[in-house]
Each structure stands twice: as structure tokens, then as C-alpha cells.
Amino acid sequence: MKIFDITRDKIIAEKVLVPRGYLEKAIGLIGKNEIKPMFFRTRWGIHTFGVRFPIDVVVLDKNKKVIKIKSNLKPNRIFFWNPKYFYVLELLAGEIKKSGLKVGDQLRFD
């Protein structure tokens, strides 16, 4: 899957992983030697316990509008948001800054 920022006319991520099932989502990026973009549904928040690299996190509403961003979330941290939003995009740290992604941007998934 590819993620495109309609607002900025930019590709945000390519070859985005979408976990299939609870176990794959629960493991996520834990223990991986390389960060690949990941998109999934969850409420409340995420953690980076066991993740070896900092990541950027993008929280989206049901229409794929950016609601909250967290740049450079370091390993062994917790990140919470309003549970009414449940789409999450995890990226390699620095991708939010590189792409210019901002709260309010509209994303498209191809």
C-alpha cells in the first residue's frame, strides 16, 4: 500500500505493512532490525517497548485526516491520544519532518 498526502501533493510512504490479525499487530515493530511503515487500527495509544529505533507516529480520523503527530518517539515509551481516533501510521523517525506532514492534512491510501 502507498500513502499519499493530498494536501501537500506528496507521497508519505510506500510499501506500507498492514498487520493481519491481533498477534501480528501486537508484535508490530518489536524486535525488527529495520523499520518499515506500518498502518493499523488501535485505540488509546501505542508503546515502543522492544522497538529498537525511534519512530514517527501519525494518528488519523475515520476519513484519514491527520489528527495528531508524534515525531521521534524513542524506544521504551508510551504515546496516548483520544480513543475516538483509531487509525495509526508508524514511520521511520524523521519522515514527518521530511514530508512536511502537518495536523489537518488529508491522506489517501492506494
Image (cartoon, rainbow, N blue to C red):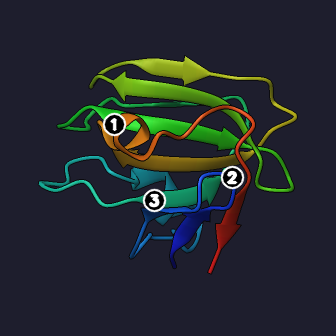
Furthest-left residue in view? 33
> Secondary structure under badge 3?
strand
Q: Secondary structure at mark 1?
A: strand
Few, some or many C-alpha atoms within 10 Å of disc 2 (few <14, some 14-19, many ≥20)? some
The mark nearer the N terminus, 1 or 2, is 2
Residue under pointer 1:
55
> Which mark, by number, is residue 7?
2
Which mark sits nearer the N-terminus, 3 or 1?
A: 3
**Residue 94 image offset from top left, x and y in percent:** 30, 36
Distance from disc 1 to disc 2, alpha carbons, whole Å, reads: 22 Å
Q: Nearer the viewer, mark 2 or mark 3?
A: 2
Q: Quadrant of residue 32?
A: bottom left
Q: Position of residue 83 (x, y in %)?
A: 81, 30
Quarter of the picture containing the C terminus is: bottom right
Examine the image and state in which quarter residue 33 appears. bottom left
Residue displayed at 44% across by 70% down: 17
x and y, in percent, of residue 7 in the image: 69, 52
**Dot 1 amino acid type:** Ile
Q: Nearer the viewer, residue 11 or 88?
A: 11
- Tell me, yes or no, whether the two marked residues, 1 and 2, touch with CB atoms within 8 Å: no
Q: Residues within 10 Å of mark 1 (few under 14, many from 20)?
A: many
Q: CA distance from mark 3 to mark 1?
A: 11 Å
Residue 14 is tagged as: none
Apparent side of residue 20 relative to residue 90 in the rendered image (left or right): right
When the figure is inspected, residue 4 is found, relative to residue 87, above or below; the finding is below
Residue assigned mark 3: 38
Quadrant in which residue 109 is drawn? bottom right
Q: Residue at x 45, y 59 (%)?
A: 38
C-alpha gap between disc 2 and disc 3: 21 Å
Say which amino acid is labelled 2: Thr
